[in-house]
Image (tube, helix red, strand yellow):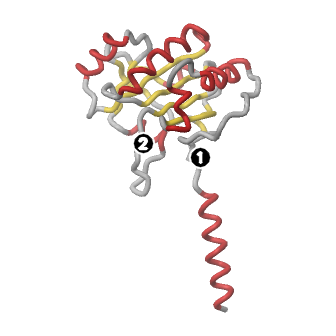
Amino acid sequence: MQLFRLAALGVLGVASLFAAESLNNRRAPGFSLMDINYNQHDLADYRGKVVLVEFMRTDCPVCQGFTTIIDKIRTRFGDKVEVLTIVNTPPDSQPAVLSFINTYKVRNPVLFDCGQVTASFLRLTPQNPRIALPHFFLIDQRGTIRANYEYGQATEAYFTGDATPLMSEIEALVTGLPAPAAKPAAGDR
């Protein structure tokens, strides 16, 4: 009987490891958020395009540098890819976002979230309250999250330089071809 209980606990323990859901390969949480000019942006309006949803802070040096990557994405892919940047208020504010937009010449919408959209994308819970920024999600033309990355040592190439791995993944989504093999995403839980 004792052996049966130990076996049952072992099975439950292994099952709980596999029950932890990934942030990828699921329908992107829907949202409608306002930008600095009080225009609403609904994720559903971008169906048919690849969408990069970036969660960031205006005072984050990596986030500031990522604006050059976003420019490269816009130049290379044009209207096939939409970039939506999301900040949380607080800690960010309208004056901070306006300064960020002007300083870094941001051309994509910067949207204001009170935390609900961030919590939905990152699947935050009391047991998993961690928010690491910057963090971005690649969403395919049908609204499915295909990849997500939070900044870290293993994902630095996605956020800096020419962002070759990121460009390759976006190219694969735009063309419908398989993406080249990449290292596992540090942000994928």
Disc 2 element: helix
Residue situated in front as seen by the camera: 154 or 181? 154
> Nearer the observer, disc 1 or disc 2?
1
164 or 52: nearer the viewer: 164
| The quadrant where residue 9 appears | bottom right
x%, y% of residue 149? 54, 35
Q: Residues within 10 Å of mark 1 (few under 14, many from 20)?
A: some
Q: Which residue is denoted by mark 2 in the rendering?
A: 119
Viewer-side residue, 144 vs 85: 85
Question: What is the secondary structure assignment of the residue under circle 1?
Answer: loop
Q: Residue at x 63, y 41 (%)?
A: 184
**Residue at 63% in and 82% down:** 6
Instruction: Point out the residue furthest to the right here.
Output: 177
Tag 2: amino acid: Ala
Q: Between marks 1 and 2, how big is the CA–CA gap?
A: 14 Å
Task: Compare marks 1 and 2 and give the one earlier in the sequence.
Answer: 1
Q: Is residue 178 left or right of residue 90?
A: right
Residue type at mark 1 is Ser
Residue at the left extreme of this rendering: 95
Q: Which residue is mark 1?
A: 22
Residue 75: give x, y in percent of width and height: 56, 7
Instruction: Report x, y in % for residue 90.
Output: 26, 34
Total number of numbered labels? 2
Which quadrant of the structure image shows residue 178?
top right
Q: Is residue 125 above or below residue 171?
A: below
Rate crowding at label 2 as few (under 14), some (14 to 19) or many (20 or more) other CA atoms within 10 Å.
some
Q: Is residue 26 left or right of residue 70?
A: right
Res. 77 mark:
none
